[in-house]
Image (cartoon, coloured by chain):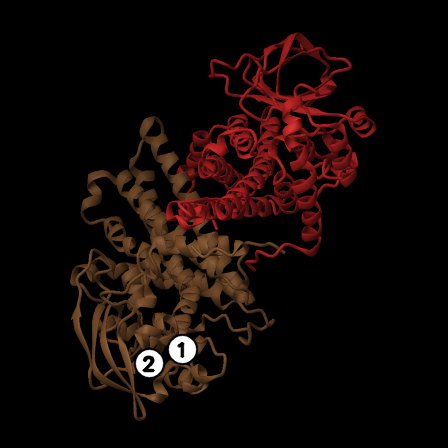
Amino acid sequence: MISFEPTDEEKAFTEVAYKFGGEDIRRSARENEQKGFVHHELIDQVNHLGFLTMEEPESLDGMQLPLISQVQILEALCYGDLGTVQGFPGLGDGASVLRVIGDQQIHEEQRHFVKENSCTIAFAEEVAEEMAQSRLKLTKSNNAYMLHGKSEPVRLGNIATHLIIGIKDDAGETILFWLDKSRNKWEVETCDNRLGLREANIANLSFDEASFSENQIIAKGNNAEKILQLAYTRIYILQAAKQLGLMVAALDYATEYTATRKAFQQPLAKFQGVSFRIAQMVMEIKMVRNHIWQAAKATDDSHSNAEGYALSTMFAAHKGIRFVTDSAVQLLGGHGYVQEYPVEKWMRDAQAQVILYGREREFLTRRGDQILAETEKKVMS
Amino acid sequence: MISFELSEQQHQIREMTHWFAENEIRPISLEADRLGYVPEDWLEKVNQFGIQLNTSSISNSKNESGNKKGVREGNRMAVIATEELAWGDPAIALSLPGAGLGGPPIQSSGTQEQKERFLTIFKNDKPRWGAYALTEPEAGSDASNIQTIATKVDGGYLINGQKIFITNGGRASWVVVFATVDPALGRAGQRAFVIEKGTPGFTCSRLVEKMGLRANETAELLFEDCFVPIDNLLGGEEMYEKKNSKRSGFQTAMQTFDSTRPIVASMAIGIARAAYEYTLEIVQQGFPVSGKYHQMAAEMFAEMEGMINAARLVTWEAAWKADQGIPNAKEAAICKAVAGKMALDVCAKSLELLGPIGLEGHIVEKLFRDVKVFDLFEGTNEIQHLVIARRQYEPYGIRV
């Protein structure tokens, strides 16, 4: 039965998250950005609330929440500040890989390490081998793998204790493996990132003929590709939910500003050019939220169209966050451009998030290829 | 719990209406467009089957009894079914017998006697229609400015004025007509009347020719000293005379929009889907499987699919709210604005993919002509923006 009513439990979680996001995260956001990392007290708080382990499997002592619950909570947290949330340590996007592979494929040694330590995972994938900037290479000789080169910038790379990497080897086979700072070596090159998400510990990772053992391989070939596909479906939905939180923050801020600031002796809201833009922001947010909820439910229910929904959702969320954060800056006028107001940071963070999590046109092409190959003509519903 | 799965009943009605749209509506679509009307024998036939566009089940009433489990899902059922009918052909869907857009105001504001008298006439002995008349030559989006006058006389009112763009207005057995007892009173002076066909002084002065929806009748109505008995004042005189009553015809009209905008949005979605699916089939057969044309088509279909899906979800949300008895004016405006704009864009993109062959013999060009009005009637896109902005600024005490 079609319903847009969250459960009582989801409402309770979300209320706590909104309070924490709107107050604690929002208050510390600018300072976190200036320092380039999230203040440890805030990390302790979010840890205490349990919001860092929502995606993690129960076998790793995680909450293993369904996506439909997670997206509501993430929206609420990112209402405070997207950059700060992206800077939280933990299993990050790697949690989705671990969630997908399940208990059976998590090596006992790795499981023990993750459970016993404050582990932070950065997740990198290098599959677009035709791209010029893809400089990470995996070669195989005498049954041993060797990783060489420099990755694209990855979130949490700066503080990662572990890495999960998906890459095609020189024979074209996809290998999904994980590296451990205690026994594998890599160099961290902090990005000279002036755009946004500066507190998200984004870094390039360099490898010099780094080898790893067989038991660090999570999956190979088709199995690895399937895991990556399922993990990315989850990651896209979770990231879209974070983006939605920032969109709502930008809308609320711009609404209040245009309701209270006057020009030509009347509130800005009274000018139709202003109020109509606010209306467009409202519409964009409604659409993105519904996309996210539908994709989350489809993934929780193992719906065959889940990946298609996720691709569509990420495109909508990217387009939406650019429009809404730009609109907020525009509606604040000159004040939107200066750092006394948060919207300039939100617009920068939004653009950084968009380029970090997939090219918009690529989402369309991938979903479009699926559509053209399908025999079912109907639009998904 | 959040869910996007159709209930068994919703699934059944979608399957049934789609079958009807595919096998009965779509085959006569282009011919009806060429003729400029839906053939009478076809209307007789479908009416005998009991197929109607009856939106009077749409209600925000908390008293609606609901399905077997006591769950009210009339609004969700209506948007699901309407999407399918419009997928077949929107002009024919709008021409189906039934109360049409005149149903919701009677359902929401009529007395029990009026509901029985006007909403029970739609039987399968012969096709009958209801209609809704608000727009005037000088009052479209500004519905508070209507000039049609209702003058109180012994036993009723004399109506004088003109209404334009009235769907099924010429053939309707009755029309819900909005008029003012005193223009100086503004919205408070408005009343809604049900005026029956054949009432002296009530004539259909013209049927207009349009860009699209050509098979559907759009009428101009004239009221010249048209006497309407007091029993046909919607809600009855008592409703307006109650102390502190803020009820007016304007509120009836606006409340109607909260019910009908999701219906109109779902029609736009059905049109967009029709264009999308038709074009997809042609592209799958005729386009190369790689290269720049393939990539262009892939991107456009993915974008269209996302747009259609987004519009459908906001429409379902508006309908779900209505079923829950939760105020849905904002969501109703959102879905109407999103769907109206989206559907035109999807039709244009579909034509772009078809290229010059789209000019002739393909339904997509007709759908393009049909769909434009869905961004106009039941409140233009700009009016929807206004409604949304008003709701957004409400907490700040600002009325934009």
Q: Of helix, strand and loop, which one carries label 1?
A: helix
Which residue is labeled 2 in the image?
B194
Chain under disc 2 = B
Q: Is residue B98 visible?
A: no
Foreground residue, A243 or A220? A243
Measured in 3D between alpha carbons, the distance from the residue under mark 1 to the one under mark 2, in whole angstroms, is 9 Å
Which residue is labeled 1 in the image?
B106
N-term mark: 1 or 2: 1
Q: Pointers 1 and 2 in contact (CB under 8 A)?
A: yes
Residue sitting at x 33%, y 45%: B345
Foreground residue, B295 or B94? B94
Residue sitting at x 34%, y 35%: B297
Q: Determine crowd level at label 1: few under 14, some 14-19, many 20+ residues with C-alpha closer than 10 A.
A: many
Check disc 2 and give the amino acid type.
Val
In percent of width and height, residue B379 lies at 34, 59
In percent of width and height, residue B357 lies at 20, 41
Q: Is residue A148 visible?
A: yes
Foreground residue, A140 or B89? B89
In percent of width and height, residue B277 lies at 35, 47
Check disc 1 and give the amino acid type.
Ile
Q: Is residue A37 left or right of residue A270?
A: right
Residue sitting at x 40%, y 52%: B385
Chain under disc 1 = B
Relative height, residue A245 to residue B24 (above, below): above
Placement of the C terminus of chain B among the 4 image quadrants:
bottom left
* Colour in which the image shows chain A: red
Relative height, residue A264 to residue B192 (above, below): above
Q: Of helix, strand and loop, which one carries label 2?
A: strand
Placement of the N terminus of chain B among the 4 image quadrants:
bottom right
Q: Is residue B305 left or right of residue B152?
A: right
Q: Which quarter of the picture shows residue B380? A: bottom left
* Colour in which the image shows chain B: brown
